[in-house]
């Protein structure tokens, strides 16, 4: 597997794309509308510089529509905003996801009630974004991982504590899960720190951890942190 | 403050009671019905031995109704099942909670859909048990803490990793929060590991962490673990 599609052009998608490129993958970022995305000249809603600037500096990453990217990738990463993920993946097209590993790193954050966000009620507690994606695209091989930290740490765990902290993984597809564990190892995660939580139902817990993450971030003003389980 | 009421006679209430006694506090456990509680001769729903056996071995802990215990305590600990906490505290009586520190260590787990439990939907995401208690008893001084771990660790953090792992605390009453931090220090928590998350709204995050806790417990079969944030 050497061709990867990354859905979503925000900081998470950018960070993951560059890491895959650095690892020798051929990468296409997927977005809703390529022309609109490149035409924007002002900062986005999150204060990031216009995507065009990043794209000009990182020509190694291809750019296409959600559908083009999904058709291109042998594996697909969902790095869209959690609230838009199902819609974005529908635009990617069910046929383009069929049989492919779909790495879901998104969280169903609900910004409608102000900051800090909670979770979207229909995608939490008795459901999760990871499970909803799997239900919507039953032929995709959904693996939930990496959603519990700032994207800088996803691809460079060594940034803090000598890389000694935890990442979670869960999936209903054991083979897909093992393949994605291999990617986590390439990202720099050590095997002992990859915590396999079993089936995709465990995505509920990893997504419901976000409000605590946001509280800790609010208290410390430092996003470069992660949890490590000790026993 | 040397008289403490602990609401709830389960393993959390028992463990906290004995720790308070060991620290020189005068402790009364509160329960719905003292006679019924002492009459039971079979294991409870969680597989614990009959309360009577524990009580006979630990006569230093007084036993009373929720109301008697709350009237007795200068501070009150809520260690009841989260789904019953509001009802239990109503039985304790609003007058008996007035002006008192109320340490809430419970979680609003919903066992109605089988195992592992999720959270009660009306007490999660946009609400929390801690906040609901504060709203229901506005004259109580609610402090949420200790709800993110097995009770054995609450009162003996040194059991694992040399005591180096985190406990959260939040409250809308800053003085009450400082007093409870003092209790955490007595329990053996080091100051650097007590993470102050600010106001009681942060109880949402600490309670929503429970599904992840349960997933990790399910994967490792070891409840004597806790998280430590590294950065």
Image: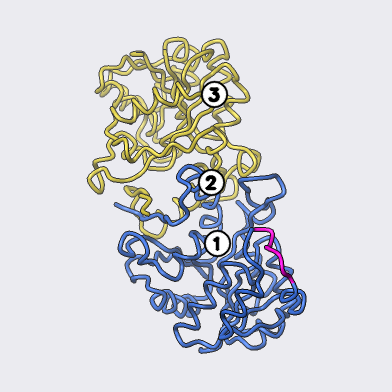
Chain colours: A yellow, B blue
Q: Nearer the viewer, residue B22 or B69?
A: B22
Residue B185 appears at what percent x and percent y?
38, 76
* Residue A19 vs residue B225, the one in the foreground: B225
Are the residues tagged 3 and 2 within 8 Å (C-beta)? no
Q: Considering depth in this image, is A41 or B2 the residue closer to the camera?
A: B2
State the count of labels: 3
Residue positioned 50% across, 83% down in the render: B21
Q: Residues within 10 Å of mark 2 (few under 14, many from 20)?
A: many
Residue that numbered label 1 is attached to? B201
Which x, y percent locates residue B106?
59, 64
**Mark closest to the chain's N terminus, 3 or 2:** 3
Q: Callout 2: helix, strand or loop?
A: helix
* Nearer the camera: disc 2 or disc 1: 2
Q: CA distance from mark 3 to mark 1?
A: 32 Å
Q: Which region is colored magenta? A: B40-46
Q: Which chain contains the residue that carries disc 2?
A: A
- Mark 1 chain: B
Magenta part, dominant SS: loop
**Which mark lies nearer to you, 3 or 2?**
2
Q: Which residue is mark 3?
A: A88
Callout 3: few (<14), some (14-19), or many (20+) C-alpha neighbours within 10 Å? many
User: Are dots 2 and 1 in contact, CB under 8 Å?
Assistant: no
Residue appearing at x 28%, y 40% in the figure: A157
Residue A109 or residue B60, whichever sits in front:
B60
The quarter holding residue B33 reads bottom right
Question: Which structural element holds mark 3?
Answer: helix
Dot 1 falls on a residue whose secondary structure is helix
Tell me where residue B113 sits by quadrant: top right
Distance from the alpha carbon under mark 2 to that under mark 1? 15 Å
Pointer 2 residue: A208
Q: Is residue A150 left or right of residue A160?
A: right
């Amino acid at each position: 597997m050497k061709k990867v599609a990354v859905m979503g052009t925000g900081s998470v998608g950018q960070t993951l794309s560059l890491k895959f490129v650095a690892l020798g993958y051929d990468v296409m970022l997927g977005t809703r509308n390529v022309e609109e995305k490149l035409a924007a000249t002002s900062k986005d809603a999150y204060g990031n510089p216009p995507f065009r600037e990043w794209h000009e500096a990182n020509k190694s990453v291809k750019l296409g529509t959600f559908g083009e990217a999904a058709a291109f990738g042998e594996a697909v990463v969902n790095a869209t905003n959690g609230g838009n993920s199902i819609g974005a993946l529908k635009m990617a097209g069910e046929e383009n996801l069929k049989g492919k590993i779909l790495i879901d790193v998104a969280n169903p954050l609900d910004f409608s009630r102000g900051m800090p966000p909670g979770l979207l009620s229909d995608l939490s507690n008795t459901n999760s974004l990871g499970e909803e994606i799997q239900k919507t695209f039953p032929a995709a091989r959904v693996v939930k991982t990496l959603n519990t930290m700032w994207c800088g740490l996803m691809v460079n765990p060594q940034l803090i504590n000598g890389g000694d902290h935890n990442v979670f993984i869960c999936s209903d597809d054991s083979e897909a899960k093992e393949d994605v564990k291999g990617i986590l190892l390439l990202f720099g995660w050590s095997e002992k720190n990859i915590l396999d939580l079993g089936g995709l139902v465990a995505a509920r817990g990893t997504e419901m951890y976000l409000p605590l993450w946001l509280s800790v971030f609010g208290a410390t003003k430092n996003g470069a942190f992660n949890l490590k389980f000790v026993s």
